[in-house]
Amino acid sequence: EPCKSTKVFGPPNPWVMALCSLCNEIYKLNKLKLNLKFEIEMMFKDLDLHVADVKPSSLVTGKAREMYGNPDFTIDKAAQPMPSVAESQKPAAHAAASQRGVEGADAQRSVGALPMQSGDISIQGDWLNFVKVTTPTFIAIPGVKRFFANAMDASVREVIAPVVERSVTISCMTVRELVPKDFAFEPDENRVRQSSRWMVAALASSLALVTCKEPLRATLTSHIWQMLQRMGIREEALEQSVNAEVAENLDFCCTVIEMHAIEKAVASIDEAIQNSCMVRRKHAESRSTAQFVDTTVLQGQLPNLPEALHPSLAGVRSQYRVYEEFVKIQRLITNPNEAAAASPAVLPVESQKQARPTVVPSGIASGGAASNDISGQVENLRALLAQIDKMSMKEGSADSYAQLQHDSELKKLVQTVFEIIDSKVPVSNVASSEQCAKQVFLSMLQGAANKLRVGIYLALLEKLNALVPGLDIKLTEWFGAINEDLWLQRVDLAETMVRRGLLNLRELDRTLSTMITARRGGPATDFAIHVVRQCIVLEPLAQSNDMALTLDVLAKVAAQGRGGGAGDALAQLVEQAKRSSPVIGKSESAPEPGLGKGEAASEPIAGKTEGAAVPAAAKDGAKDGESSLHDQVSYILDEWSKISDLPNRDKLAAALLVTLQQSGFLKSDETAEQFFTSLVEIAVSHCLSGEQQNQQQQQQQGSSTPTVLSFDAVDAFVKLVAFLINRSANESDAVNPAARGIRRASQLFRVLGVVVNIMQKTSKENPTAFNPRPFFRMFIGWYMEILESDVGDEVIMIPSLAAIADALLALQPLRIPTFAFSWLELVSHRCFMPKLLLATGQNGWPHFQKLLVALLQFLEPYLRNAELNESIRLMYKGTLRMLLVLLHDFPEFLCKYHFQLCDVIPSSCIQMRNLMLSAFPRNMRLPDPFTPNLKVDLLPEISESPRIVVDFNASLMGLQGVVNTYLSMRQPANFMKEVLPQKLLLQDANERQLRGTKWNVPLINALVLYIGMNAIHKGQAIPMEMFQQLVLDLDAEGRYILLNAVANQLRYPNSHTHYFSCVLL
């Protein structure tokens, strides 16, 4: 169009005429859509040209183009017979069909897999067996499964190459950057390789799924429509059936692409981390005693990281568990056997009944076996263990694994077994892993008591114990099942297993006490005496309560032999055991022969808490039968911390619950409050015990990094509270879940009340020294232990959510400013805010509204005075982000409570106020404001009243009756001139100074809304007169506040928006 108004570029400019010639050629193309032809005609008209006067060019005529799916051309609906599928197959497909022995004509035309055009990616298998046809429309079409198989095969081919390439590139790049840094202190190359494979498989699978699903849906739909047109089916009503069939078969196509992505990603990551593995292999071959550190990945990284994020050897063990989780988060395949058949080179067949679900591609697990489960390695392990037995007997010069030569055949053999365990056990079910451990344990007992051999077996059991939950209890059961005559021969082995944590003392205690009671002597008694002497008295590897049942039985045996030397000696041993000191860490015990020391045990909670100790029965001063509440609670928390993370925690906690019941801590509200108060004080004291010393060291060194705290006691306390609450159900709860929810909430509220009181007291006594981190950890722990466990039962969950909301309201930033950032994170946490707002009947909305108002009240003076230091600025940004989440996911909440929220937002915060006012219900479609001749008053929504919650009795502060009288009778006469302006002023000078204005802003906001609602419902003229009079009588500041209150009601289309817009106009 601009060309026609210029002399240079108007016709007959050669450039413009050449373009016109090209447009004329396009205009004459066959099947060009009419709208494009119309556009070309309009262009010629604007240039004062005629199509017939311009000679068409020959640039595009004769060139091949895709007609189907092209939006510029119409599709010819004429039916063409679909070519036989068999004609499009390669000989390999017919060979595959004949090998499977498929009978009938359909088998001869079965759809095989054609070689991919993307290099090394190829799809193998027969799609025909996995096509699902569910709609009656397509079931009635003969041979439809063959056509669908052809469409699925073609769609996957079209999408797979770029999807796999992108997914593999991103996942490998991510893993290559993260894993070497996380495992910089890990000397075991198998762990590094395994972690890399787990992570890259999970990432590649997820990326491939996200990337391919929508393109694959569109491509598959396109191929099916093309197939229908070739078959001569023109019914437009088939769209719903086509979409249903695409949805039914889409997941299987995605699974095939995922498996190819995983296979290629695993192969690629092995090459990417080859250098890291080589560094660890050289370090192992050098037999160096120095701690391994991969300095190549830490260069230039440590100075930029806070000390808490520095990689360390201690963090490697917990980090490995994080990578183990990648195996669990991979997408479950609907039918693994189907995917395996469609892509046998990628997807191994694996039982869906395994306790550890996931389909792991071949290549992730090293060892070369066809089965991914450890059960497939039984014969291989048995042969390897037999070779280890033979070779360990020949290595007479070595007493431990560390003394072997680096090129020793025995060393290579042991490494092979470790590789099998590392690769197979994490992806096997618990039963198969326990069978593997049992084979290793029995082989250790059956062979010769060679020091090197036993050390190797113990190291293998340690590895299995670290990977299989609850294996120590199983080992104890197997140990108790062997012949009693072998016990005394293996007493040193049992002592070593206790030291390494391979035997569960409580399980061993039950076994020994039962056998001694049944026989009153024999090998079991002698074995028990040796264990008590070595593991409790001489070297305190355990506490007396760990062997309480055995000590009681031995005491009875000693009483029967009282007066003799043996009886007196046994009685003295039992007394010494009961007065034993607390258990020492494993790092303090002597090292055992074998592959190396066990990991150091964590320090008991009682040992790090002031005044904490073991129970009265285990102390020298216990004869008086009294101990302080602090000591008893400390002991209970210490005992609980040992079993809280075990898989059989409920079974082991039975004895601890008996202790709690006998102590009477939970009998009344008063004793329960004392008990939980002591628990909180002990947990917080343990957490902060090393903070002061670390701060002094940092001051001397000039460092400002945050102190690393130990949260072991806090986590134990959280899990103990959650355990007690979850066990509070009775028989009636199955019939009345609401009663259970109320009972659980009351118990949680009692604990939260104790925590709130302690936090308020501590922050009030010494605000600058208050550390919120232990308390923040408590709330996060309860989110995970209590709220997440009730995710399926809303009736039980809502009372607990309300209890936590009330506790957070008591801890609002106005009361404890040092807890403000933690408080904001707790309020907006994914386990709390969505659950509270998604509650049925909007029961959680009032609780969250109070929390949000408390947050805005804290920020209001800073925002009003524009005093935004770095902390307040961060707080403000966090609040805006939370409000954006509410605007996106819960706009109805902002619509309902906009009045209360705008009350506490200062007038200077335009962005935050507009964010509140921009919310509109999700079921409403807003009109386009640029629509010509838009009549707002004709919109159907304009007559509907919005849903708001306002308590005018409280908001109008006693003015409601007077305002109603004036609205109905214009009485009293001096109301607008004298009474109302005085009522809108703040009377207290201190309050004026605190709020920064002389006007009562909340009262003005409520008055404006109340007058407007009366006008809407009653249709009077008096409200408009009142607004006009107020605008004239109020000063500039009051007028601004009044108009601001009117603007707060301008929101989405509703009766309030319409009326108040008329007021402004």
Image (cartoon, helix red, strand yellow):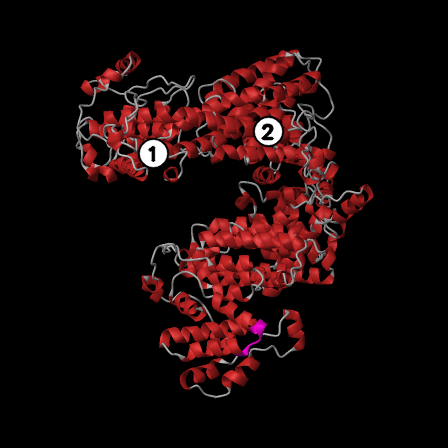
Amino acid at pointer 1:
Arg
First in residue order: circle 2 vs circle 1: 2
Give the position of the N terminus as an image quadrant: top left
Left or right placement of residue 707 versus residue 922 in this view: right
Dot 1 crowding, Cα within 10 Å, few <14, some 14–19, many 20+:
some
Q: Which residues are magenta?
A: 1033-1038
Q: Which mark is residue 177?
A: 2
Residue at the spot of label 1: 217
Left or right placement of residue 67 versus residue 664 in this view: left
Q: Which mark is residue 643?
A: none
Rendered position, 739 above or below 515: below
**Regarding mark 2 in the picture, which secondary structure is present there?**
helix
Q: Residue at x 18, y 18 (%)?
A: 105
Q: Can you tell which quarter of the image residue 48 is in?
A: top left
Image x and y of residue 1044, in percent? 52, 67
Rendered position, 798 above or below 569: below
Q: Can you tell which quarter of the image residue 1018 is in?
A: bottom left
Q: CA distance from mark 2 to mark 1?
A: 33 Å
